[in-house]
Image (tube, helix red, strand yellow):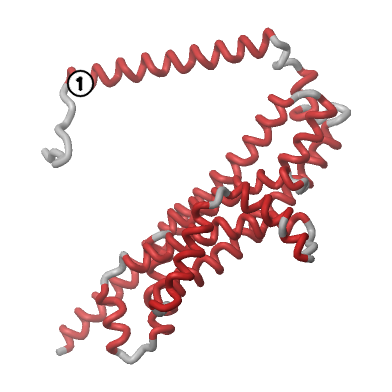
Amino acid sequence: MTTSVLYETPGPVARRRSLLASVVVGALLLAVVAWVLWQLGLQGQLTAEKWGPLIDPTNDTFAALWNLMGQGLVNTLVAAALSMVFSLVIGTLLAITRLVSAPWYRWFVVGVIELLRGVPVVIAVFFAARVLPSFGLNLPTLWFLVIGLTAYNSVIIAEIVRAGILALPKGQSEAAYAIGLRRGQVMASVLLPQAFRAMLPALISQLVVILKDTSLGFIIAYVDVVRQAQVIIQNLNNPIQTYFVVAVLFIVINYALSRLATYTERRLSRARRGKVAAAADLQQAGAAGD
């Protein structure tokens, strides 16, 4: 019988108390949900008139509503995809630059990163949409949103990648230099792949943040899913129902991204274990041959 070093195995009394606490908390949560639904029912928020346009295909406005919602969702995904790609590329370049930069200009790179880290993302988006046109940079609204999101998230990703590289054993780079690789080859072929693999959960979490932050596009009149939801609410006067559906859409997409991260991490772990096992088998075979 094994016991944990961090805590003792709960005894019968502790298990009963834990079960009782779980039942009480669960009952309280159910009571809160029931009270909220009751209040919504009293205010007429659970009627078919409010929910029909969103969930009833036979409703007259169902097709038009989901056409608007679909256009907004596509625009949201496009902005998120572009921001993710640019943030990953620029963030990786910033991380490498900070690590390999000479002391005389490293302060500038660190200053840019720290400045953008301290700026709220909504300010970055608003700055891109209001200030850049005054310098003659007139772009579609999509690109102002992408610029704002990239400016903020690229420096966060830069710090994630830098932390992953610094966490690697020094022997990795020393071995690479010993076989004659140059600094760029060491970074691209040895350090970056391992850093990305180690920091994959944090990177995926930041990509989820980027997707959620695209909802800020409504402040610059970008026609995303939140903006389309506002149009629907103005016509149907059902904010609770519409925003609930928008929230569900974001939850589903973010959950899919999280599952993709878990799947990718497992595949990479299995591939790494397979390579280690294959190398061990070759070593054993060579030893047996000798």
The quarter of the picture where the N terminus appears is: top left
Is 44 displayed left or right of 59 in the figure?
A: left
Q: Quadrant of residue 235?
A: top right
Is 191 placed above or below 249 here?
below
Residue behind mark 1: 14
Which residue corresponds to the image point at 63% horizontal and 35% vertical from the top-left? 247
Is 201 placed above or below 221 here?
below
Q: Secondary structure at mark 1?
A: helix
Residue 270 appearing in the image: no
Is 114 placed above or below 46 here?
below
Q: Report how many numbered discs are placed on residues in the image.
A: 1
Residue 212 appearing in the image: yes
Closest to the observer, 15 or 98: 98
| Rendering coords of residue 108 (x, y %) | 48, 70
The kind of residue tagged 1 is Ala
Is 184 displayed left or right of 212 in the figure?
A: left
| Rendering coords of residue 225 (x, y %) | 73, 42
Closest to the observer, 6 or 219: 219
Q: Residue furthest bottom?
A: 180
Which residue corresponds to the image point at 17% horizontal and 35% vertical from the top-left? 7
| Rendering coords of residue 188 (x, y %) | 44, 78
Q: Quadrant of residue 88?
A: bottom right
Closest to the observer, 282 or 194: 194
Which residue corresponds to the image point at 73% horizontal and 53% vertical from the top-left? 130
